[in-house]
Image: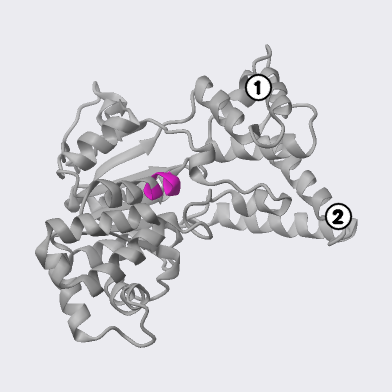
Amino acid sequence: MSDFRQHLEELKANDPEFAENFDFGYALFKKAWSTVTDYEQYNRMTSNIVTGGDGLEFEQEDIYVPLGLIERQQRPKRDKNQGSPQQGSEIYQEKITPISSDTFFEDILGQGKSKSQGKRIAIIGEPGAGKTTLLQKIAEWILVETDEIPVWVSLADLGKRSLREYILEDWLRDATQELEAPNQKIKDAFSKSLKDGKIWLLLDGVDEMGVDYPLQTLATQLKEGWIKNVRIVLTCRLNLWEANRNELYNFQFDIYRNLNFNREQIHNFIENFFQGINPKRGEKLDTALNQAGKERICDLVKNPLRLMLLCWTWQKEEGNLPETKAELYRQFVEVHYEWNKTRTTYQQRQKLNSALGKLALTAIDQFQSRFR
């Protein structure tokens, strides 16, 4: 928190208007800072919900391995009369350009070198690809590198409310530590920050919104005038974005997807995971993944969440590597049940597995399912 106080003092010295409204500014920055540094909520790895039961809880700085990104050039809406049979599938292909994590932060966020000038960014990807972790890093970057304010919104918390309602009634109330709705002076000060382009909206989990058509709902709200000068970064699962991306076409989002881990990054992640627990066991896992014939599982754990699951199960019960994604998850479930063996009986576990299987099948069969 000492860095935070130093940051505030620098703002007071360099910005007379901020100093004049210090009480409001302090509250706002305290809320924004806690969004990315509070140990209990935001600076912990999202996977701690899995590993925490064993006392294995990680902060980002302990285990984080930066990922490169791919820029996905959004295809224009195609006239049905355009294209020829000779072009074949080429008319559907997207151009992809890999960039490093440093380039993303320095050029896209810092200098606005993108078609939206860094003002509209979508981070898409598969479950467990590191979207939320990257968004947390963006929030931290905003606070350290700029005098602007990241407003973090977990979209699953919106319910049926609009972004405007949630921010003014919930976020701003929490920021100013008020029991009731913020007074007009606070709302006016926040409104000025919006108009001056000092606010970033960090919207986590479009696919988790509690509405039938999340991207369409979000598109409607982004047309509201108060958002005009706000910079927006959102995260969304790949399948939902691909099926409905034209809903946000007119907003000209820069679209990025996290790259998977490469072999060196897998090694670094394993080393970070086991360094304070059992380094020798981590070395054994790394060696096992390098063995001939293990290319398939090595490819599977290029996904950060799956690698975390593998590390956790290996720490719990060192043994044979799974060969498929299904075996990896089955191994995880078995270890989880063993860890909780006093809570359920064998018969209860069988019933639970059957019920979860039916739930998964129902979700897959639903055309509009966001969790496929």
Mark 1 and mark 2: Cα distance apart in space? 29 Å
Q: Which segment is the magenta one?
A: 131-136
* Mark 1 or mark 2, earlier in chain: 1
Residue corresponding to mark 2: 341
User: Label 1 crowding class (10 Å Cα cut-off): few <14, some 14-19, many 20+?
Assistant: many
**Closest to the observer, 75 or 17:** 17
Query: Which quadrant of the figure has residue 323?
Result: top right
Quadrant including the N terminus: bottom left
**Closest to the observer, 156 or 86:** 156
Could you tell me residue 212's position as x and y percent? 42, 66
Could you tell me residue 147's position as x and y percent? 20, 54
Would you say 3 lies left or right of 293 here? left
Q: Amino acid at mark 2?
A: Lys
User: Label 2 crowding class (10 Å Cα cut-off): few <14, some 14-19, many 20+?
Assistant: few
Q: Amino acid at mark 1?
A: Asp
Identify the main secondary structure in magenta: helix
Residue corresponding to mark 1: 286
The answer to whether one can see residue 22 in this image is yes
Could you tell me residue 180's position as x and y percent? 35, 88
Which residue: 24% across, 66% down? 220
Which residue: 14% across, 71% down? 20
Foreground label between 1 and 2: 1
The answer to whether one can see residue 243 in this image is no
Q: Per the image, is 260 magenta?
A: no
Give the SS element for disc 2.
Answer: loop
Q: Is residue 321 above or below residue 189?
A: above
Would you say 331 lies left or right of 228 here? right
Give the SS element for disc 1.
Answer: helix
Which residue: 58% across, 32% down? 272
